[in-house]
């Protein structure tokens, strides 16, 4: 029986061509088994942001700390999608498509959706490299533009504990079978 790489040593570095994959959460909030690659992400546009949770302190009349309660921090993953597809825009925004050919347009009616997604970050070309898997996220996407990159989308995946009861797993990219 093969030993799990994560239990005995540090996994291969998941640098380089990291992909962002998403899908609908599975039954009872489990990690999605059907993930779709969202496309190219900006090499410098992937970051994790942790915001400390609320801290409640109980102090006596002299200012001495008697007790403290810390709330769970918020964790968000920020990434920039390069050239987001019509399908990707339709996934995270309320859109409708009309016309054909050169008259085809995708009308954006709202930049908000309440859909929940599972998210996976991985470099599938590096066997044994670490993966990051979150079974339940709320994703927001904002349109952006730069003269060097054209139209992009600034995305934030805010991790939720959801029905699965946990925030995320670290795993490894399995060898191709």
Image (cartoon, rainbow, N blue to C red):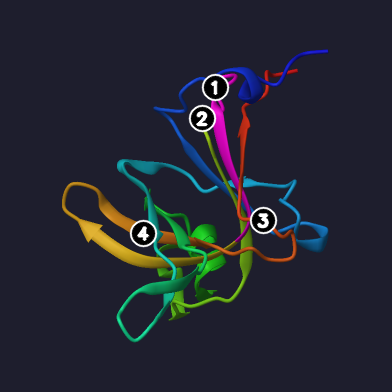
Decide: few, some or many residues near mark 1? Use Cα within 10 Å; few <14, some 14-19, many ≥20.
some
Residue at (81, 62) in percent of width and height: 28
Of circles 1 and 2, which is in front?
Answer: 1
Quadrant hosting residue 127: top right
Residue indicated by mark 1: 11
Q: Earlier in the sequence, mark 1 or mark 2?
A: 1
Q: Using the image, tell me which numbered label, if any, was put on residue 131.
A: none
| Side of 173 relative to 17 (left or right) | right
| Side of 145 relative to 112 (left or right) | left
Q: Position of residue 116 (x, y in %)?
A: 63, 67
Residue indicated by mark 3: 166
Of circles 2 and 3, which is in front?
Answer: 3
Of circles 3 and 4, which is in front?
Answer: 3
Local secondary structure at mark 3: loop
Local secondary structure at mark 1: loop
Q: What's the magenta region?
A: 124-136
Taking depth in this image into account, of 32 and 54 the one nearest to the observer is 54
| Side of 14 relative to 150 (left or right) | right
In what quadrant of the picture does the C terminus appear?
top right
Residue located farthest toward the top when viewing the structure as drawn: 1
Q: Earlier in the sequence, mark 2 or mark 4?
A: 2
Residue at (57, 18) in percent of width and height: 9
Give the alpha-carbon distance from disc 2 to disc 4, as whole Å: 21 Å
Q: Position of residue 120 (x, y in %)?
A: 58, 45
Q: Earlier in the sequence, mark 1 or mark 3?
A: 1
Local secondary structure at mark 4: strand
Residue at (38, 82) in percent of width and height: 60
């Amino acid at each position: 029986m093969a030993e799990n790489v994560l239990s005995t040593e540090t996994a291969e570095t998941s640098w380089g061509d990291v992909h962002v994959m998403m899908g609908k959460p599975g039954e009872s909030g489990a990690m999605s088994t059907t993930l779709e690659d969202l496309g190219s992400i900006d090499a410098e546009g992937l970051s994790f942001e942790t915001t400390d949770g609320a801290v409640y302190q109980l102090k006596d009349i002299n200012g001495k700390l008697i007790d403290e309660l810390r709330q769970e921090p918020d964790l968000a993953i920020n990434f920039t999608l390069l050239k987001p597809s019509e399908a990707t825009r339709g996934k995270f925004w309320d859109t409708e498509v009309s016309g054909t050919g050169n008259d085809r347009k995708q009308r954006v009616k709202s930049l908000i959706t309440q859909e929940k997604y599972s998210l996976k970050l991985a470099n599938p070309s590096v066997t044994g490299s670490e993966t990051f898997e979150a079974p339940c996220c709320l994703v927001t996407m904002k349109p952006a533009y730069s003269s060097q990159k054209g139209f992009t989308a600034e995305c934030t995946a805010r991790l939720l504990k959801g029905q699965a009861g946990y925030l995320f797993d670290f795993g490894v990219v399995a060898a191709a079978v």
